Image (cartoon, coloured by chain):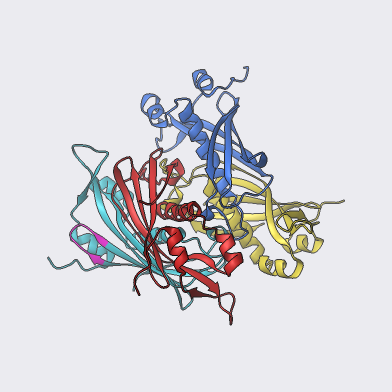
Chain colours: A cyan, B red, C yellow, D blue
Amino acid sequence: MGHQIQFSVDFGDCDPAGIVFYPNFYRWFDRGTHALAHSVGLNMARLRAEHGWICWPLVDTGARFISPAKPGDLLTLESQVTQWGRKTFRVTHTLRHGERLVCEGFEVRIIGAPREDDPDKLRTVELPDWMARQFGATPDPR
Amino acid sequence: MGHQIQFSVDFGDCDPAGIVFYPNFYRWFDRGTHALAHSVGLNMARLRAEHGWICWPLVDTGARFISPAKPGDLLTLESQVTQWGRKTFRVTHTLRHGERLVCEGFEVRIIGAPREDDPDKLRTVELPDWMARQFGATPDPR
Amino acid sequence: MGHQIQFSVDFGDCDPAGIVFYPNFYRWFDRGTHALAHSVGLNMARLRAEHGWICWPLVDTGARFISPAKPGDLLTLESQVTQWGRKTFRVTHTLRHGERLVCEGFEVRIIGAPREDDPDKLRTVELPDWMARQFGATPDPR
Amino acid sequence: MGHQIQFSVDFGDCDPAGIVFYPNFYRWFDRGTHALAHSVGLNMARLRAEHGWICWPLVDTGARFISPAKPGDLLTLESQVTQWGRKTFRVTHTLRHGERLVCEGFEVRIIGAPREDDPDKLRTVELPDWMARQFGATPDPR
């Protein structure tokens, strides 16, 4: 069971075909990840201040579209950390309209930190086990 | 070689991390597909009028983010049809800032048509070979 | 008293200055107008089907920004029809973060209908009094 | 004569009515202001570094919509500083499709600086005359 949020599809989220313009699904995935992090007490600003970490840049994403969503549809987004590697973790998202599956997708994210030789660039930080536990995830065996 | 378009990253395309908010990359993929179709003379409205087709709903998408893009960056997007199946085709997108690779991704699209029993729903149409040729693609052997 | 909705500011709604990118305030005004219409039982699709009306294109808009909003802020938007003329009506929007005023603005909207000589163009329809009443507004004296 | 940029309306910029979803006009106004600033050599990052200024938060905006714009329309946006006061300046935007006027609007902007007693909040900075000249504007008589 992941963290759930609900929201309605706006008229302005939809395109001339009358259905959700697909990049908005990714906008909602990002919303889901932030809501999930917030729900388990992970705060981006505090992680930045305490550890110098930038949380959580994306390296890979994907989504399959199963059925369309329209203005006014009340959607339920479920977001869950489903994989926890040494340097990347995966958030899986499922979007439903009632029982009907609308879309499912994923985000692969990292922890970044400013590089010492060039603070405008990021290096990848090894993921701490405590963060996996806080997200309710199980780190991959090493 | 695919079809190329160029555009600049807007201030408003970027998030509090100062880099492009990732759903915008998909917004640009969609722009690239429309520009590619237009460049080969494929017109959505005419395809709708002449064949009753809805061109081209998405069934699958994905993107990997290799390096960040910032406000003012002039990006080059190259879009190309790289696979042509019986009912789906794939558009591959590559986004560069000068020589630097920013992002690469894909869209899997279909041709839809209103279902006879329920015109609000779509059925998938078999892809015509002539459209593959017009896109500069080679249909998969059957 | 207008109709109220609540929502949180997304990370992706904010720009590199770390505050809401201002066009999003208008996106939320549009959301507020649709929520208000829905709350009083006005349905765009039904108005289209029953009367041939396109509800409700915009002719004028404006917004003043009083204080910034940031990712995670829970905002309350209050939307109300504050003027009802012969051919235009005004929706007034007030956005607050708790007691703090964030933004206030307006939309002037019309009812459109396809022109008989050129259905791709719209003519303006005289506003019906019953719609004013349904919105809880008082028509201007004539 | 203001600074001009050109761009096409994307499919995804349009809503189920088939025309531009109006908040996008403001997105383009912001683009026009940044393009204008860039064209006269004003750089936000440098103004921040050299003067500590945050350029240029918005305090008021507005737009009138004269005729609709559709996917594929090539638009010309003209942006110009038309008023320069002691603490605010106005950028006027005009958007055309060929000769046809689509939309006209304005942004009232300021220079902000972090307040000494609370750096998270901004105070308004008196506008320097040299910036008016650089924008091609005439400061109001005092």
Q: Quadrant of residue A117?
A: top left
In the picture, measured across the screen, residue A105 lies left or right of residue C3, that is left
Task: Using the image as rendered, state which of residue D67 and residue C90 is in the foreground.
Answer: D67
In the picture, measured across the screen, residue D55 lies left or right of residue B141, that is right
Residue displayed at 38% across by 28% down: D46
* Residue A49, x across and y down, in percent: 28, 45
Q: Residue furthest left?
A: A142
Task: Using the image as rendered, state which of residue D101 and residue D51 is in the foreground.
Answer: D101
* Residue C67, x across and y down, in percent: 52, 42
Vertical relation: C24 (above or below) D131: below
Residue displayed at 23% across by 46% down: A113
Is any atom of residue D95 visible in this view? yes
Q: Which residues are magenta?
A: A83-89
Q: Quadrant of residue B52?
A: bottom right
Q: Is residue A84 magenta?
A: yes
Total marks in image:
0
Residue displayed at 47% across by 72% down: A67
* Residue D9, x across and y down, in percent: 55, 48
Is any atom of residue A35 visible in this view? no
Task: Using the image as rendered, state which of residue C6 and residue C45 is in the foreground.
Answer: C45
Q: Is residue C40 magenta?
A: no
Vertical relation: A133 (above or below) D35: below
In the picture, measured across the screen, residue D86 lies left or right of residue C142, that is left
* Residue B87, x across and y down, in percent: 43, 72
